[in-house]
Amino acid sequence: MTEDLVDKRKTLLEESEEHKAKRNELNSQASQFARERNELNNATRQYVEDAQKNKELRDQSNNDVQSLKEKRNELNDKANTLFEEIDALRGEQGTGSAAQSHEKKPSAKDIQRQIDQLEERQQTEQMSKEKENELVDKIKQLRAELKDQEVEHEQNKEVRTRLIEAREYRKQASAIHAEVTEKAELAQKHHDLMVECYRKADKSREGADAKHKQFVEAQEAADAEHKQFLECQKQLRDYDKVLTGIRSKQKKVKSVKENKSARKEAETIFNAFKSGEKLTTEDLLKLQRSKLI
């Protein structure tokens, strides 16, 4: 019976060690998943912060675009007013067929309005490279027409004075338009960066969620293994109590048997001593242990 219990205890101990090793392995995996999850969460936060910074920069650039457009339009309006005056003066000075010829030509104001509209399209619309090149060529053509009219108008002193002033307004407006284009491109750049950062944040957030799921699964499995390990430990303690009891009882039985045998031997020696037989030192010691003398 004792040997059977010892064998069962040995098997249970091996099972306990297996659960302990599996628990430790799963806890290690859970810790790794937790570290990876935390790294991804940190990356997500950083991507969101970067996206917010780019959003603020985009909005600032868009505000700059709006402010610059207002200044540009104000300068263009001043130039247009002067061109209207130039066209009026041209109409007053032209007569007969010459006047009719002038009337057929678009005014400087109309030409500039077309240029402004085309530049606005170039700045705001998405178009193919071929289409953009056509637009640029059209703007160049209109600018050439405008230049021709200006050369013609310069023959008149009153017209020339207004033309110089109008050109200065156009020059300033053109410089601001270049800033508008630059700021608009910068706004688009920050917008694209913002979108990319949010895309990366979504991806890393999905990765963090997946790692958290793996962490929870590993942790739950480790808890289950630990529970089984504790159960094995409890059973081992029960086996130890039983085996200790059995061994203690066996030891007592053996001791009683040994005492009986020693007592019987001592009585035989004592009877021989009473009969006058000579005793050895060992015989005397046995009598002393048995307390017969």
Image (cartoon, helix red, strand yellow):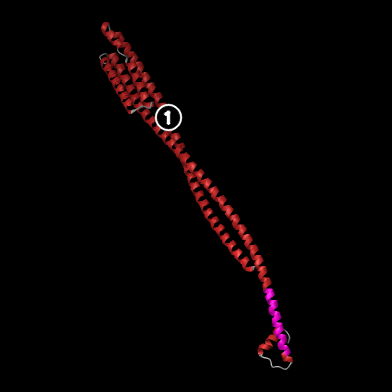
Residue 2 picture location, percent across and down: 64, 68
Q: Is residue 135 above or below residue 255?
A: above
Which amino acid lies under the numbered mark 1 shown in the image of this protein?
Asn
Does the segment drawn in magenta span residue 253?
Answer: yes
SS for dot 1: helix
Q: Is residue 284 above or below residue 143?
A: below
Residue 26 picture location, percent across and down: 53, 53
Locate the C terminus by quadrant.
Answer: bottom right
* Image quarter of residue 183: top left
Q: Which residues are magenta?
A: 251-271
At x 61% / y 60%, what residue is drawn? 233
Locate the N terminus by quadrant.
Answer: bottom right
Circle 1 packing at 10 Å, graded few (<14), some (14-19), many (20+), is: some
The main secondary structure of the magenta stretch is helix
**Depth order, front residue of 226/127:** 226
Residue 73 picture location, percent across and down: 39, 22
Q: Is residue 271 above or below residue 194?
A: below
- The residue wearing badge 1 is 62
Q: Is residue 74 left or right of residue 142?
A: right
Q: Residue furthest top?
A: 96
Count the labels in the image: 1
